Image: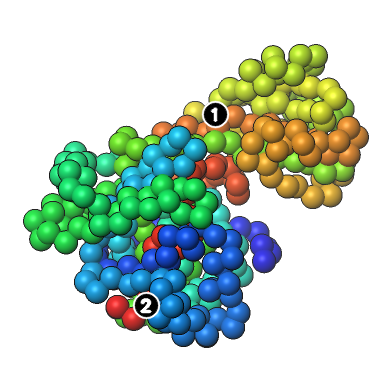
Amino acid sequence: MESGRPTVPPYVAGPLQLSPFRALSLAPRRVGDPASARAFARPYRGVPQRLQTWQKRGLATRDELPALYLHEYSDSGLTVRGLVGTLDLSRLATTPAARQVFPHEGVHPQQVVELSARMSTMRLNPAPILLVHRGPAAVRDISRQVRATAPDREYVDHAAQQHRIWAVRDPEHLRIIGEALAGARLLVADGHHRYAASVALHDRDPGPTHSDGLVMIIDQDETPLFLGAIHRLLHGVRLDDLVGVATSAGADVAICPNPDAAVTALSPDTMVLTDGRDWATVRVDVPPGHAVVQLVEGTLLQGLAKRPSRITYAHSLVQALDEVKPGRVTAALLPAVELDLVIDVVRAGGLLPEKATSFQPKPSLGSFIRLLDE
């Protein structure tokens, strides 16, 4: 599906408007169950009827009244909390100063076209786009007030995520939230293609049905998502060749016989190369407002006589080290990118390479679905 060179996603302008909606949620035992994905499988035109059948069988429920939702979920010792609602994506920024929603990765145009067509046919947004920011105190205060009451739903899903959900319908709470978020500047943490597809839906069919997208807005100062690195696995590339290229590019390269010492050397200006047998640290001059991951292409790949036969990705050191093979697969281990650096990059008009960041944990599929018949 990922064909062609990635393009810059659109930037949405404000004032931002987060609106209530009638949430459709799968039954707790279905949330986080990989088998639940069949509800959104081909034929896509049959998805609405399929979900209606699931509701009749008690496998899904839909709220009678619209609301914003305070959603708290816990996974692997981390608790994340955010507001779920529909965000008006119909106003696009015409100047950098007008931008209020900031993607940080490019998207594949064909994938955007296919996904927007699929959502239109299914008549739904299958999951919230994750947006993060450093939220205003007024919203945190509403969050505390709401959490002082009993949750409307509380359950452990199929994937062992723990969920607590409050429906926010109080007019004063909604007013305060709306005013506080109108001028927010939000970073797309996860769901870049769904974000671009939601904007494309409105471009193709302007009107209220497609003006909004389903989002979850997380206050990174209150319950931060973990921001991890995504490592590169370079297939068909030898470690010695990468070391030679990095040295020629002016990087400070050091062979490191101790794997633990090499991993410890990971830092904002240092990546690590390994084929599982040998290790090397590569320290580069990182310009202000840039991240090491942005320099992989110029420092490692451009100087190779032959580019990698393919590049795959690992979300953990353990996964990367499981896949390296001397002489066949070499890993470029990267440091995590700090959130403030990501924000600096995107607000300056830049993007990070694909799969540069891993925001975790994400909510399980099925916790919130939005039907387009609102």
Tell me the quadrant of the picture where the C terminus can be found: bottom left
Left/right of residue 75 with respect to residue 293 in the rendered view: left
Tell me the element at label 1. loop
Q: Which residue is mark 1?
A: 287
Residue 77 position in % (x across, y down): 45, 35
Task: Give the x, y percent position of residue 57.
Answer: 43, 78
In the image, residue 347 above or below residue 113? above
> Would you say 85 lies left or right of 102 here?
left
Q: Position of residue 267 (x, y in %)?
A: 58, 22
Question: Is residue 201 something one can see in this rendering?
Answer: no
Which residue in the protein does label 2 denote? Answer: 372
Task: Using the rendered view, name the quadrant where residue 370 is placed.
Answer: bottom left
Residue type at numbered disc 2: Leu
| In-front residue for pair 81/293 | 81
143 vs 256: above or below = below
Indicate the amino acid at tag 1: Pro
Q: Give the residue displayed 52% in from the left and 85% down from the top.
A: 46
The residue shown at (75%, 41%) is 233
Between 316 and 298, the one lying in front of the other is 316
Q: Residue furthest front?
A: 57
Residue shown at the point (59%, 83%) measured from the top left: 43
Residue at the right extreme, as displayed: 327
Measure the C-alpha gap from mark 2 to mark 1.
Answer: 45 Å
